[in-house]
Image (cartoon, rainbow, N blue to C red):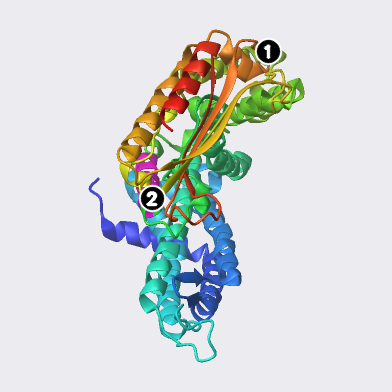
Amino acid sequence: MNISYKRIYNGSTAELISHKKSRIITIILMSFAAVIYGFATSSRGDDVNPSGLAIFMYFAALVPLFSCCTAVFKDMHDIPTADVQMSMPLSSTERYISRLLTIVRIWFIPFLLSAAAAFLLSVMFAGSHYSYDHYDSMDYDRLYHSEVVMAFNLKVILWFTAMALFIVSVTVICQCCIGAKAESKYLPVMMIIALSIFMPVMYGFIKDSFADVSTSSEPFIYSLWTFSALAVDLDKGRDIILLLINCLISFGVIFAGLFICRKRDARTVGKPIVFPLFFEIIAVLILSLFFVLFQMEGGFVVMFIAWLGIIILRIVVSRKNFSFAKVGIWTALFVGYYIVFLLVMYIAFLTGGFGEMNKVPEKSEYLGYISQIKVDIDKPDLSSYFYRYSYEELHTENFEVQLSKEGAKQRLMDYTEAVSRLSQKQNRINGLFSSLMFGSTHSEAYRCTVRISVTDRSATDYYGYGETIYRVTFFATEETARELMDMTEGVK
């Protein structure tokens, strides 16, 4: 059967009638959000402050979006609806596209219209915009910065679009893999939450444990295809690229859902998990988060809760196929997943946090008058996750480098790269992995911290330190620690 866009549109129109309430609620929320956002947005200079109430209402509109996504795929977990849908003269591809078109007509079209209205209103009638030159004076100049508001509004629209597409993509892919009503409701919520915190938690754990490095220009790389779009700083242009990538990944997942949907038929309706691999992916995501909590001094209570939770979840989705013998198999799977988790963490340790340890500042970050270098080397007790600082202090150094002096900038750059090379030796210390993961003692490891800051203040202006362009904390043998001491003396 050739794809007919007329049949797709007619199918979407028929579906639209069933979701009239969701559409009305969405339109009401979007309309009020647009008016409030448009008139309440204010800016002083380059500082834009949108209305908190309007942002909340846009967030509230994400709830009917989720409800709509589960409702339009009702035929995949409801037998009467499936009988009606299957009898219609639509191919599986046409049914899938018509459902997506229904979601677009219920939520995305009202959102785009609302965003356009909010955009125009905020540019035309937003609050007063002052010039910094006259803001403190009695006769300040009411200078309107429309281009600032326009740029910020475009970022906000993309921000909400990324989050909405993420909800749609996760929910759609779940509906394509689930055949029971209960699972079609709670499993998408579990997936949205798990995926939203998975990357930030894993990235943070690996970075803090095996590659404690930061520079002045780090992107929010963990905000790709997650609800973590919330963490994106809208004042930084480079993060717009991350939001665009977020949207593209969501489109890719939605497109992949078409091929999964084609494998569904009436025989899969009512089956809790249609594709076992889908459930195992959920299990891996959730258990990995619990494993991280266990490594972060959560104790065996966390591991027991993780085991008990996944066993209960498997019993629920197994329905009549449950037997006590399967508990042993599921426990073995649980242990297997933990072993794989440890192997991944060990690879992260050997590679310095998958290469994070290799980070150094860009050349342009070294510009300024003065650089402050602070080095601390001590021998902590690794039996505590928080390092109780019952340590033998070996070295503490704190000094400044005049970057205007001949060769000073190059020496500083060379020093940063040399410190980075030294820090990578951490990954070859025997026994350090178990010390970092399980809190056991490592009597030979020295904790080294190097912090480099650069300020553009003049040599005669002594008001605090500048921006930290590089900070690294790593463990080293005594030989490497003394090598760091000698390098630090040489950079003065």
Please provide percent x and percent y for residue 433: 56, 15
Where residue 357 appears, x then y in whole percent?
A: 44, 27
| Residue nearest the observer in this picture, 113 or 410 | 410
Q: Is residue 288 shown above or below 333? A: below
For label 1, the residue is 441
Residue drawn at point x = 43 percent, y = 55 percent: 458
Residue 234 x/y as whole percent: 45, 59
SS majority, magenta = helix
Rendered residue at 55%/39% (across/down)? 191
Q: Which residues are magenta?
A: 240-259
Residue type highlighted by circle 2: Gly
Residues 460 and 286: in front is 460
The image position of residue 62, as x and y in percent, is 54, 59
Q: Which residue is mark 2?
A: 368
On screen, residue 393 versus residue 222, left or right, reads: right
Cα gap from disc 1 to disc 2, whole angstroms: 42 Å
| Quadrant of the image containing the C terminus | top left
Give the answer, above or below, for where 41 lies relative to 179.
below
- How packed mark 2 is, by other alpha carbons closer than 10 Å (few <14, some 14-19, many 20 or more), is some
Q: Amino acid at mark 1?
A: Thr
- Residue beneath the point at 62% across and 19% down: 437
Figure quadrant of the N terminus: top left
Which tag, 1 or 2, sits closer to the chain's start? 2
Which residue ends up furthest to the right in the rendered image?
301
Numbered circle sitting on residue 29 = none
